[in-house]
Amino acid sequence: MTIIYRTAGAWGSGQGTNLSAAQVDGNFFDLATRVTTIEGGGLNAPTISSFTIVGTNLFVNMSDSTVLGPYTLPTASWNFRGDWTPSTVYAVNDVVTANGSVYLVMFGHTSATTFDPNANDGGGHNYYGLLLTSPSNSLPTGGTTGQILAKSSDTDYAVQWNSSFVPAGGTAGQLLVKNSNVDYAYSWQNPSALPITVEQLSDVVVSSPVTGDILEWDGTEWVNVSGTVTQGSISRTIGGSSYNLIAGDAFAFLMFNWGSTVTITIPDNASVPFSIDTEITFCVDAIGTVVTITTMPGVTLNVPTGYLAQLLCQNAVATIKKIATDRWHLFGLLAPDA
């Protein structure tokens, strides 16, 4: 039934006269019935069983399988402020960068004159929270084309950009020469342009080169082939079953003591550009050693008629002389062509 009112108000229009006894009882009966209905249904009312969040939406799952929602959840957004600046008002969730790191403002404040990652208000509220920092082993900035990364000290990750130890360019047979006492001051030069004759020093690793030092690649590593010897005074003993002549052999006296067959190969001018009139002398330095001279393709070795390009016996000596590009003469104590 409808509740009957006497006067007009927020409930609507009243009837304008006193209610009869039946009307009053009807009003009470209507209200009592509604309360009884609510009380009876309340004992079996559904309850919340769980919550589900999808993105910024909240869903309420009820025990009777009904779902309430979605309800939009409030979210906090970051405000990227760029580089930290002094005497600036910062609010919560502002993001700033300082000294290569990224910080989140945790407590509103006005910044000081200098940045302090541990700054606080004295009441236990830190102003900044570290989000991201640069790793300690990052590469240094700067550098130029062709430079290499080198250790600057024994400290971990202490590196810097240095000029390359070996310059670019160069051609086959050229030597690496120290031009001055300045670090990494090297250049490629032809052996014929050097003021001194050089000798290869086996297994010498380049260490602390100085002005005038000459470096040569032996196929495995750089070796120091510097010397103060004069033309024709170089002599050394060589072992092994084969030997390829190098730029440092110019005007050398090479003694072979392998005790078996040794093959000496004369390189072409493109590989090792010996200067015209270069002489190299060979000696059989041990019993049983048979020294034979051969050439790379394209190189001519003139041998006396009736003789082989082979030394005769122990202590035999023979010399080759460059007379033109890729042309050599052989003379000395040679084995006959039997």
Image (cartoon, rainbow, N blue to C red):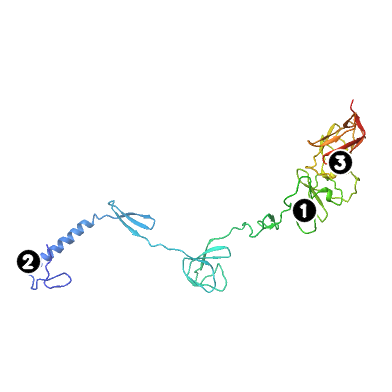
Which percent across, then down, holds residue 274?
Answer: 83, 44
Near-viewer residue (253 or 241): 253
* Residue 215 visible in the snapshot: yes
Q: Viewer-proximal residue, 147 or 68?
A: 147
User: Taking 96 as reference, is 157 above or below it?
Assistant: above
Q: How many marks?
A: 3
Mark closest to the chain's N terminus, 2 or 3: 2
Give amino acid for label 3.
Lys
Label 1, residues with CA under 10 Å away: few <14, some 14-19, many ≥20: some
Q: Secondary structure at mark 1?
A: strand
Residue under label 2, please give it: 22
Q: CB of mark 2 within 8 Å of CB of mark 1?
A: no
Mark 1 and mark 3: span between their CA atoms?
26 Å
Q: Could you say which disc has been placed on residue 322 in the image?
A: 3
Q: Which is more toward the observer, 282 or 241?
A: 282
Residue at the image position 16 percent from the left and 72 percent from the top: 9
> In the rendered structure, which amino acid carries the disc numbered 1?
Ser
Q: Do callouts 2 and 3 mark residues in contact (Cβ within 8 Å)? A: no
- The quadrant of the image that shows the N terminus is bottom left
Task: Determine whether, in the image, residue 272 is placed left or right of residue 234.
Answer: left
- Cβ atoms under marks 1 and 3 closer than 8 Å: no
Looking at the picture, does residue 301 appear above or below residue 225? above
For marks 1 and 3, give the one nearer the viewer. Answer: 3
Tell me the tag on residue 260.
Answer: none
User: Relative to 284, is 116 above or below?
Assistant: below
Residue 187: assigned label = 1
Quadrant where the C terminus sits is: top right
- Residue drawn 33% across the image and 56% down it: 59
- Identify the residue at the far front of this view: 324
Label 2 residue SS = helix
User: Residue 297 in the image: x percent, y percent?
Assistant: 78, 35
